[in-house]
Structures are given as structure tokens and as C-alpha cells.
Amino acid sequence: EVQLVESGGGLVQPGGSLRLSCTASGFTFSSYWMSWVRQAPGKGLEWVANINPDGSGTFSVDSVKGRFTFSRDNTKNSLFLQMNSLRAEDTALYYCARVDILSGSGSWFHWGQGSLVAVSS
Amino acid sequence: DIQMTQSPSSLSASVGDRVTITCRASQGINNYLAWFQQKPGKAPKSLIYGAFNLQSGVPSKFSGSGSGTDFSLTISSLQPEDFATYYCQQYYSYPPTFGGGTKVEFK
């Protein structure tokens, strides 16, 4: 069974940093593109980034470029989201998801349960 | 970026009703369209991909149609477990974008 478990969320002040992790199991992690998708409280879904299987390439939404970095450790079946210079508008539940449809920019069949990031003073 | 416009943003329906949600893309996306269901406090669940392909394990009361820029999700006979928010998503190009969601509520 595919499982994705996020961790590392919490409360952080504006301008601060936080690192999210996503631990995968039940599939060959190193073979899949992975994504981060976020959802602000009471709002819709917003794609954040995709990372390719070996971690050498990423795509991300413009609003996080230069502030967020994306990486993975295939030896530990883990995905990481390093968030710097956090803003109030980054407050959201952050999901990791497995890219199951490779066409175009991809879509997902499998999602984690999310990790909540709150940016507030 | 491709804008995805869902309508309605919410609807009230009764058990047994046939419900249709529409999604319009700001440009043609072929059939690179997915639908998700999300219940409160839960992660999104994949329902349909490629505009009309039913995800494994999803009941056949859900169906997708459309092509180009106009798509729809239909629930043939609404059941209590179907009250949720539904999102469309295009994956034709970067960035992948979602519709604003349609909340299906009990009448």
C-alpha cells in the first residue's frame, strides 16, 4: 500500500524557516516524480512544486521561487521542502503527493495527510 | 498560466439527485484534466483522470466528460458519502492549476 507521511510543520514567525519532510513507503520511491501541493485554511488547492526521480530537476510556482528549495533522499525514501523567508500567505496545509500521471505537468493518485504550516507573529 | 473556472462554487442537493459540475479552462488542454473529491480534514482523493477515466476503486456513479476547454463531472445518484468539495485540475502545462472548487451540500 502506498503511504506518504508528512512531518515538520508548526508555527513560525514571518521571515522564519521551516523544513518539511515526507516519508514514502509501499512503492519504489526513486522511480517517481513527487510533488508538494498546499491548501490555505478554508481555501482551494495550489500546486507548489514537482521534483524529478533523481532530484536533479524541479519545477515550482512563481510565488515560492528563491524562498523554497526542494530535495529528496532516495536512500531514505524521503522528500523535503525547505521553506525560508516565510510569509503569512504561506500558511497552509502542505501535502506531498506522488505523480502518477506523467503527461504534461502531472497529476496524482496518492496523497499524504498533510503537514500544517502557520506563519504568524 | 491556465485558469480553471469551476461552476457552481456550491450547490445544494438531495440524496438520489443527479449532480453535474462544470470546469472551463482558459485555453485548450486536450484531455489533461483530473477531478478530485475532498472531505473536511482529509486529503484530496483522485476520482477521474484524462477527463473521463475512472480511477481504480471509484464507483461508476461518477463520470467525466468534455474535451478542449469545457469539462464536466457528473454524479448520477448522490449518496450521503458524496457530500464533499470537488476540484478539477489541468495538467496540460506548467504550472498545474486547480479550479476553485465546488462544495456539494445537503439540501
Image: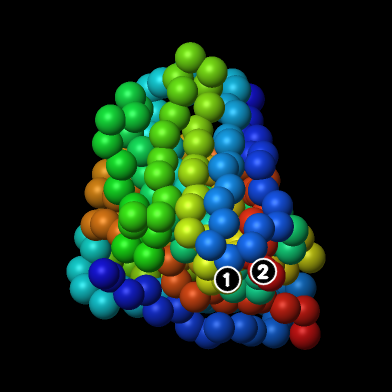
Q: Chain of mark 2?
A: A
Q: Does B73 sit above or below residue A47?
A: below
**Which of A1 and A75 lies nearest the eye of the viewer?**
A75
Residue type at mark 2 is Ser
- The answer to whether one can see residue A108 in this image is no
Give the percent coordinates (x, y) of residue B14: 75, 79
Q: Are marks 1 and 2 on the same chain?
A: yes
Residue type at mark 1 is Ala
Circle 2 SS class? loop
Which residue shows up at 20% across the image and 69% down it? B28
**Which of A27 and B37 lies nearest the eye of the viewer?**
A27
Give the percent coordinates (x, y) of residue B59: 61, 50
Q: Does B100 sit above or below residue B98?
A: below
Q: Which residue in the structure is indicated by mark 1?
A: A88
Residue B34, numbered label: none
Give the percent coordinates (x, y) of residue A45: 52, 64
Which residue shows up at 41% across the image and 21% down it? A30
The C terminus of chain A: image quadrant: bottom right
Q: Does A106 sit above or below residue B33?
A: above
Give the percent coordinates (x, y) of residue B55: 50, 44
Q: Quadrant of residue B79?
A: bottom right
Packing grade of label 2 (10 A; few <14, some 14-19, many >=20) is: some
**Which of B2 and B105 lies nearest the eye of the viewer?**
B2
The N terminus of chain A: image quadrant: top right
Which residue shows up at 24% across the image and 63% down it? B29
Tell me whether circle 1 and circle 2 mark residues in contact (CB < 8 Å): yes
Q: Quadrant of residue B69?
A: bottom left
Circle 1 SS class? helix
Q: Which residue in the structure is indicated by mark 2?
A: A120
Packing grade of label 1 (10 A; few <14, some 14-19, many >=20) is: some
